[in-house]
Image (cartoon, coloured by chain):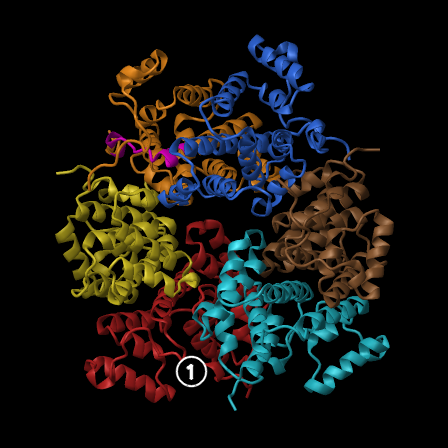
Chain colours: A blue, B orange, C yellow, D red, E cyan, F brown
Amino acid sequence: MSDSPISRYPVPELNSLPDDVRDRILAVHEKAGFIPNVFLTLAHRPAEFRAFFNYHDAIMEREEGTLTPAEKEMIIVATSALNGCQYCVIAHGALLRVFAKAPKLADQIAINYLHAPISERQKAMLEFAIMLSRTPEQVQRSQYAALYEQGYTDDDIWDIAGITAFFGLSNRMAIVTEMQANDEFYTLARVPR
Amino acid sequence: MSDSPISRYPVPELNSLPDDVRDRILAVHEKAGFIPNVFLTLAHRPAEFRAFFNYHDAIMEREEGTLTPAEKEMIIVATSALNGCQYCVIAHGALLRVFAKAPKLADQIAINYLHAPISERQKAMLEFAIMLSRTPEQVQRSQYAALYEQGYTDDDIWDIAGITAFFGLSNRMAIVTEMQANDEFYTLARVPR
Amino acid sequence: MSDSPISRYPVPELNSLPDDVRDRILAVHEKAGFIPNVFLTLAHRPAEFRAFFNYHDAIMEREEGTLTPAEKEMIIVATSALNGCQYCVIAHGALLRVFAKAPKLADQIAINYLHAPISERQKAMLEFAIMLSRTPEQVQRSQYAALYEQGYTDDDIWDIAGITAFFGLSNRMAIVTEMQANDEFYTLARVPR
Amino acid sequence: MSDSPISRYPVPELNSLPDDVRDRILAVHEKAGFIPNVFLTLAHRPAEFRAFFNYHDAIMEREEGTLTPAEKEMIIVATSALNGCQYCVIAHGALLRVFAKAPKLADQIAINYLHAPISERQKAMLEFAIMLSRTPEQVQRSQYAALYEQGYTDDDIWDIAGITAFFGLSNRMAIVTEMQANDEFYTLARVPR
Amino acid sequence: MSDSPISRYPVPELNSLPDDVRDRILAVHEKAGFIPNVFLTLAHRPAEFRAFFNYHDAIMEREEGTLTPAEKEMIIVATSALNGCQYCVIAHGALLRVFAKAPKLADQIAINYLHAPISERQKAMLEFAIMLSRTPEQVQRSQYAALYEQGYTDDDIWDIAGITAFFGLSNRMAIVTEMQANDEFYTLARVPR
Amino acid sequence: MSDSPISRYPVPELNSLPDDVRDRILAVHEKAGFIPNVFLTLAHRPAEFRAFFNYHDAIMEREEGTLTPAEKEMIIVATSALNGCQYCVIAHGALLRVFAKAPKLADQIAINYLHAPISERQKAMLEFAIMLSRTPEQVQRSQYAALYEQGYTDDDIWDIAGITAFFGLSNRMAIVTEMQANDEFYTLARVPR
């Protein structure tokens, strides 16, 4: 079994890219030690590349939010698993292991968050995220009541929704491009330190 | 029955907004004759406002694409209807009526695209968009084969996926904010000219 | 895009019809100003035409009931939308606009009744109607308890069930005959007076 | 375990009923040797009683049709089983045993028609009836093509649809009234002659 | 309509079987008066025959359990009906009639347990069994709470789960082998004594 | 986040177990270097312990079969993932990595087998296993035709069904006991050699 190509679409040479796109890629390479394939895949269309990562940062790097980095990754892993997105589960599973310092948690949540060792508050967050992701037509005010009971505010709800919605977009682009997760993500942070 | 507020979240005064956000809103007001509520709702968070509309434009105003404006709106109406998003069905239904010059088409597609008077090629496009929107985990290569048979290219497929994915995000934000469609959208272009 | 024929089946000449069937059609024409296509479509089989409209009247014109005309149309619009029936959503959406004097309500309920500006009591009615329509095998006594709490009686429940059941039949006949909604229904009562 | 009442609603005395309703009940008693509970249950509302049985006869006693009595009952049993309607499965299961002279067939179809000893043509009929019954929104022209291939005409399709639609109505009324099947139906025609 | 063969796979001659397998079959023949086809079907693979019936006995003949024989059969009938397994519904429906001394109960539960004349406690048991059988991924601690409220212990829950799980296996083997239920099961205990 | 207990049920001391049960556990400890928790969990009920592992061996160690060890584990991983069983996905994912010598394959199949780098023949096998596991009521002869086309025999189909059915049982017992996967399984064979 040889490896699949990174993307079903052409992957551009770094040299051929607009400066800002290439610079963003070089920066992530510098920071992570490798280039996550989502950067190379989306670089096929620079305008969408820019739109995607700007939206990503607006959601994921919002300073006022109260969700922890690990909680954000829980949402991504749980919803991406149900959407059948290999790239997102494997890449963000790695980040979840890093942020939660919990080497088993990403697999547990990807398979079945109901049996994962997380708090009731986090389960309520994931229950809402999954409903919004999989059956948005069923979301109604009683869901918010359940979240308020766990101490979430309307701003938290917007944050949960924003992450769910953005990574729902990301799942669908990764599926259609057949984006492959980098080998590094599979093994990252699997051993506790 | 009095009208619901525009959004479940605070709607900022135009004067309180960053210049670029306010300018974008004034420009759409100038062009459309009213301010679609998605602008006022998302202005609650300027960073996400910018990210949202930049992504929107990257997808919807891409010049190289071959999908017609009416076809793009068909995708939005069909997938938003299944996701139960009032704002998107009503606002983009209006745009579909405008672009297709077909005053009944938006209602027909929102209720059941299988019975709408569109081409087999357009039905294949919508079948794929709906599968990607509702059951992304089931998308596989045989779907692309069906699209190739109708003359779609891989670049068209990326476009269909991009619209489906972006408006899936949009649906979820509109649902969680309980964004109300402007009255204008309900009646726009309902009478043929 | 030219218009589809009224029905996938032959539509008889008025002159060729039995007297009682023709008289009923002329009476509705007189009253409404046009002949709703359900009359012309079902006239293909006079015995079923008679059975259909007699049942319709027994359900919809029952004098002892407490559901308002607008509430009956809410049930029809909500269940027909989920069943994907263009004729029923568009024709009864028009009637809902007329009876509720609410030009946006039909579209809101057709897309997602959970986000429509109706009372909690009406939402409970629609929740039951939708369960009975879409998953009758799951109906059980706890549903009645929820309706009693909202002040509904067992006779109201029979009425809700009767409308749901009859228009479920109607949806299926409209779908198989590919019955087209008259142009008049699309625009009726869209402007408040 | 004592027997449940015939209906969740009041069952009228025969003497209290309008003459035509009582006469119809006496006639069926004369013919069948017992009164099927659907007659007693619906007699609670004479106008709907009349509408129901007139529609029933228009569908089930149509002379021009080509479906055999056993095939009509197959449709009723298969769709009623999926709708979870005890009355309809048990009463029409008995009729299917009678008409098909096949004492095991009703149970086999109620549990899983795909494994019942019926013809491919009959399976195609049931596949269509079940799709129309359970997911009417998915019915489209390709289904008719499959039926034409098996020799069904458009008039046959109307017949299949009419039976499916009418007994879908019947299922829902039986479920909401909690109509009990008569003991006689459970054992009728279980032994081959 | 001639009878289908007992199994889609070869059915061995009794003489050709290993002694222990043949002895088990002769013993059941002696006791029941006929050989249930599950014995003949699985005898095609003696090792799996032994494993199957040993597991069956470990589950069904466990002495410490508190579920009654009729309750065990209720679980089997309800879950097998949803899995579409003719053999299991018909054979265990017969056993349910025998154990419950209730000639209508098996049909009622097979069609819709929610409308069967059983206790609330038994309905809670079946609700859990059905969730575990059909959507095991949704089982969570709140289900156990509902069972504890009805007086079930954790050992009872293991018993319910064991029966559900084992007959889920049995359903799938019966479906793939197209195992036919013996004629005797269809009529057994249909008349009260 | 501390670790959850091995099982929701009592885990017996090795010394307290019947000799044959303890011997089996010691043997697996000897061979694997640790005791997989399924042994300790099921030892709570020795009779079911014996039945479970005997059935397991009859299915998984059948000598005449043609499925490779890796293919058997693919079936287990794919069906267990959909059933939401952490223990089975993680433990058998480890075995799949070992047998296939493919450190990424288990995660890929658990998330979405349609995008895993396996052969069309293996995908057909998994498609059938998943249908049998998740919607057994829909299995019909056309599925076997698809398998024959890929070169599978009826004996292979029995093997695929047997593994699917047995691990469906296993999934449900692991879910109800809340069986935890051993830490060893999470990391086993993640690095290629």
> Which one is nearer the viewer's eye here, C159 or E7?
C159
Report the amino acid beneath label 1.
Answer: Ser
Question: Residue sitting at 24 percent across and 72 percent down?
Answer: D45
Question: Residue sitting at 63 percent across and 75 percent down?
Answer: E181
Look at the image and say whether residue B181 sits in the magenta stretch.
Answer: yes
Q: Is residue A65 above or below residue B112?
A: above
Q: At numbered mark 1, what does the secondary structure look like: helix, strand or loop?
A: loop
Residue D160 appears at what percent x and percent y? 42, 63
Residue D123 appears at what percent x and percent y? 54, 64
> Which one is nearer the viewer's eye here, B57 or F8?
F8
Q: Quadrant of the C terminus of chain F?
A: top right
Predominant secondary structure, magenta span? helix
Q: Quadrant of residue F90?
A: top right
Look at the image and say whether residue F168 sits in the magenta stretch.
Answer: no
Q: Quadrant of residue A78?
A: top right
Mark 1 crowdedness (10 Å alpha carbons): few <14, some 14-19, many ≥20: few
Q: Which residues are magenta?
A: B173-186
Q: Is residue E169 above or below residue A103?
A: below
Q: Quadrant of the N terminus of chain F?
A: top right
Q: Which residue is mark 1?
A: D2
The answer to whether one can see residue D117 in this image is no
Chain under disc 1: D
> Which one is nearer the viewer's eye here, C130 or E136?
E136
Residue B188 appears at what percent x and percent y? 26, 30
Residue occupying the far bottom of the picture: E193
Residue occupying the far top of the picture: A19
Q: Is residue A71 left or right of residue B11?
A: right
Residue A144 appears at what percent x and percent y? 39, 41
Q: Is residue A12 above or below residue E187?
A: above
The answer to whether one can see residue C137 in this image is yes
